[in-house]
Image: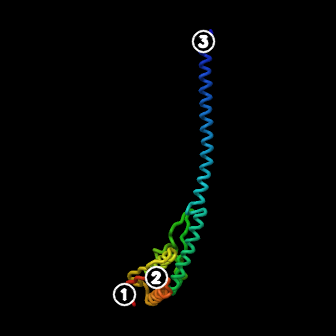
């Protein structure tokens, strides 16, 4: 009888040790899951705050794009004699689309600046590049075959703008290839 009870006791002890061991493993896994959930919450919060489309960086980027477009529009108005304004890019589902609508006169805005006429695209491109160069801290301003898609009035205003830019010494170096005086 004692040998049977001894075997039974050893089996029960093994079961108790196994169950306690499994219980400790389950408790450890549970603690790890809780720790990882807490960490995931922190990481998701940081990702939302640092995301370029939303949160703090998204706000800064959106503000920068609005200011950049405003500065480019100021240059466009120096040359263009009718209303032509680049609007900041849109947000779709919280993400920046990097499509810049353009207001042309009183008509419905053009969906993106790439959809404008060649003359409009040319002056918008010039203004965006010049704005970027100014933000960067000046440059050589390199222009090749500029003004080919502008009418005579706009072309004259464009070259007057470039001349004033050079005379004010805002552009230290200007390289321009053109068939127009």
Q: Position of residue 35 (x, y in %)?
A: 62, 44
The answer to which of 153 and 145 lies nearer the viewer is: 145
Callout 3 crowding tier (Cα within 10 Å): few <14, some 14–19, many ≥20: few
Q: Residue furthest left?
A: 179
What residue is shown with label 2? 172
Q: Is residue 116 above or below residue 23?
A: below
In front: 138, or 98?
Answer: 138
Residue 158: where, in percent of width, then height? 46, 86
Looking at the image, tell me whether mark 3 or mark 2 is earlier in sequence order.
Answer: 3
On the rendered image, what quadrant is the C terminus found in?
A: bottom left
Q: Earlier in the sequence, mark 3 or mark 1?
A: 3
Residue 33 image offset from top left, x and y in percent: 60, 42
Q: Which of the image's four quarters has the N terminus? A: top right
Residue nearest the viewer, comparing 84 with 66: 66
Residue ID at (62%, 40%):
31
- Asked if one can make out residue 154 in the rendered structure from this viewpoint, the answer is no
Q: Nearer the viewer, mark 3 or mark 2?
A: 2
Secondary structure of the residue carrying tag 2 is: loop
Separation of residues labelled 3 and 1 (CA atoms) = 111 Å
Q: Residue at x 55, y 65 (%)?
A: 92
Which corner quadrant of the image does residue 23 belong to?
top right
Residue 88 sits in which quadrant?
bottom right
Read off the residue under disc 3: 4
Tell me the crowding category of disc 2: few under 14, some 14 to 19, or many 20 or more residues within 10 angstroms, Cα based: few
Q: Secondary structure at mark 3?
A: helix
3 and 1 marks in contact (CB < 8 Å): no
Mark 1 vs 2: CB contact within 8 A: no
For image coordinates 59% across by 15% down, the residue present is 7
For label 1, the residue is 179
């Amino acid at each position: 009888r004692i040998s049977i009870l001894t075997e039974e006791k050893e089996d029960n002890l093994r079961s108790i040790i196994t169950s306690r061991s499994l219980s400790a493993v389950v408790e450890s896994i549970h603690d790890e899951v809780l720790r990882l959930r807490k960490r995931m919450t922190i990481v998701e919060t940081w990702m939302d705050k640092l995301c370029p489309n939303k949160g703090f960086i998204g706000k800064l980027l959106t503000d920068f794009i609005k200011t950049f477009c405003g500065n480019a529009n100021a240059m466009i108005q120096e040359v263009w004699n009718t209303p032509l304004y680049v609007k900041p890019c849109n947000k779709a589902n919280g993400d920046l689309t990097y499509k810049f609508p353009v207001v042309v006169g009183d008509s419905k805005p053009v969906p993106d600046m790439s959809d404008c006429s060649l003359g409009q695209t040319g002056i918008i491109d010039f203004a965006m590049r010049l704005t970027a160069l100014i933000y960067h801290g000046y440059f050589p301003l390199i222009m090749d075959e500029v003004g080919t898609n502008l009418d005579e009035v706009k072309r004259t205003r464009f070259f007057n703008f470039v001349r004033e830019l050079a005379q004010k010494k805002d552009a230290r170096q200007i390289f321009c290839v053109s068939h127009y005086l």
